[in-house]
Amino acid sequence: MADIYELKGKLKHIRIAKYRFVLRPYDFIKLSSYAGSSLRKDFSLVFKQITCTEISCHCKSCKKKKDCPYYISLEVAQGIPDPEYKRYQTPPKPFIFEPPLKRKSFFSKNEDLYFDLILVGKTLEYFPFFAASLRRLGQIGIGRNQGKYSMKRIFALDLLRNVVAGEYDFNSSEQAGDRDFSVSLGQLYAKYSRENDAVNQVNVTLATPLRMKRIGAEKWHLYFRTLMRNILTRIANLAYAYSGCTDFLHFPEIIYDAGSVHTIRENFTWEDWRSRAVRESSSNVRLGGCLGDVSYRGEITAFWPILRLGEVLHIGKNTSFGLGRILVEKSDGDFISHKIKL
């Protein structure tokens, strides 16, 4: 696959970092049925208050929008109208809130609430704004009861070694947040390429609801080619919008070759719920999606590192809420559901 060489060359320009926030409720916090929607909705309002210097000005007409952390990270109207890339309308959000996979909506003052935050490309330099907004949110309140919390700890995670690389201390003059903990997708790709000599069967678990175009169709299936196209398109969008890649990426050979991998079993269920809208002018929004497992068989070795990148970046819609998180597992035989790890 000649496209693999192009992909490797581009991945080194896309950098990401992952942080873990540990919160301690003052009394109790009641979140929505899916914690990611509460985090994303409440955070965005505070983030604008902290970063915006022209509150009275609409984002579309603001002269400072090209350098505004809020506009770049959150404003949905920032789509780049480029006739060369017709399928590119609005960029994906360059961050992901990842709540624990174990569903929990009530937190008392005696237990910690933690979640991970993944930043991509341009937003890496906005980490201090993210940290300050989440700290401020603790004073305002979060969730259905506007529960207040204190920011207990912030850890920077090393994605290459899967260890804690640093800790953000609010009482120290030297902040871990000032250091660069990012890694490139190229480094992760190289790491994942060394994990297996040969992969002929994999199980993919949809750990959080997956929303994709046409997913509501009665006979919808997550074919391997569809999965590959979605991961590669997401990488291309993030590279073009936030990582300085001026040319849009296309990988027709990889997607074509993915068609030789067959689905041997799938088991999906639809979960639907409504969340308070992020924008005041909008009604509640549906955030449901598919959950379950799918198993593939074929020559998957070359696709393995791409699947693992999909684990990190999520797929589908509303990824900033933490939706579309997949877990990938090599399989040597029978289909076994992935055991969700906390």
Image (cartoon, rainbow, N blue to C red):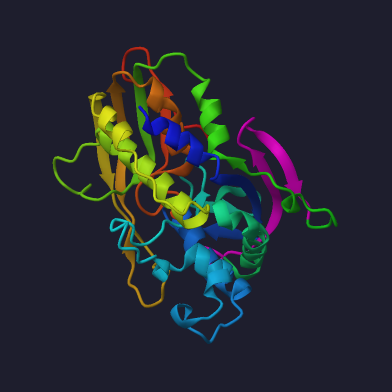
Q: Residue at x 42, y 26 (%)?
A: 304
Residue in the image at 68% along x and 60% along y: 128
**In the image, residue 336 lies at what x, y percent?**
35, 21
Relative depth, front residue between 10 and 337: 10
Q: Residue at x 61, y 80 (%)?
A: 53
Query: Does any portion of residue 208 appear in the rendered image?
Result: no
What percent of the width, then of the height, locates residue 227?
Answer: 31, 37
Question: 62 or 86, which is in the foreground?
Answer: 86
Please name whichever residue, 233 or 309, is drawn nearer the observer in this view of the structure.
233
Q: Is residue 271 depicted above or below 68 in this figure?
A: above
In the image, residue 158 lies in the stretch drawn in magenta:
yes
Q: Is residue 336 magenta?
A: no
> Can you tell which quarter of the image residue 69 is in?
bottom right
Number of marks: 0
Residue 184 in the image, given as x and y percentages of width and height: 58, 40
Q: Residue furthest left?
A: 219
Q: Which corner quadrant holds the N terminus?
A: top left
Q: Residue furthest right?
A: 173
Please give left or right for residue 185 compared with residue 134 in the image.
left
Q: Is residue 233 left or right of residue 123?
A: left
Query: Which residue is drawn at the image coordinates 35% and 66% (left, top)?
Result: 81
Any part of residue 76 in sight:
yes
Left or right of 24 in this view: 312: left
Q: Which residues are magenta?
A: 142-169
Q: Quadrant of residue 306?
A: top left
